[in-house]
Image (cartoon, helix red, strand yellow):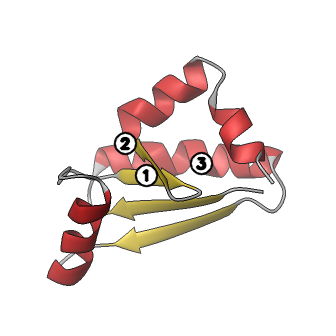
Amino acid sequence: MATVEIYTKAYCPYCVRAQALLAEKSADFAGLIVQEIKIDGDMALREAMITRSNGSYTVPQIFIDDVHIGGCDELVTLDMQNNLNALLAKA
């Protein structure tokens, strides 16, 4: 099963939307690991996110098995194109 890392901040509606989609997918994929990384007030975590995402500084930033997916819009697009399940099902 895939490991998902999602960098978030409090009060971010896009973070909430992405987390809701991932929670919905967790019901379909037993063993899916979703790790939330809260960057509120933590400059080291924020810098790590920016570095990992090749300069993207908005949240959420989402990684599936260490591959940068992008933000909420990209995650939703993957789901709408029926490509998200394949990424999450990888062993």
Label 1: which secondary element: strand
Which is in the foreground here, disc 3 or disc 2? 2
Q: Residues within 10 Å of mark 3 (few under 14, many from 20)?
A: many
**Residue 62 tag number:** 1
Q: Which quarter of the figure has residue 69?
A: top left
Type of amino acid under label 1: Ile
Label 2: which secondary element: strand
Residue 47 position (above or below residue 65): below
**Residue 53 tag number:** none
Q: Which residue is mark 3?
A: 22
Type of amino acid under label 3: Leu
Instruction: Find out whether the residues at labels 2 and 1 contact each other: C-beta distance under 8 Å.
Output: yes
Type of amino acid under label 2: Gly
- Left or right of 24? Residue 68 is left
Name the residue located 48 percent from the left edge and 36 percent from the top edge.
75
Residue 58 appears in the picture as rendered: yes
Name the residue located 37 percent from the left edge and 42 percent from the top edge.
70
Q: Residue furthest toward the top?
A: 81
Q: Which residue is mark 2?
A: 70
Q: Which is more N-terminal, label 2 or label 3?
A: 3
> Marks 2/1: CA distance?
5 Å
Label 3: which secondary element: helix
The N terminus is located in which quarter? bottom right
Name the residue located 39 percent from the left edge and 39 percent from the top edge.
72
> Marks 1/3: CA distance?
11 Å
Where residue 58 appears, as percent x and y from the top left, is 20, 50
Which is in the foreground here, disc 1 or disc 3? 1
Q: Give whichever of 9, 37 is nearer the camera.
A: 37
Q: Which is more N-terminal, label 3 or label 1?
A: 3
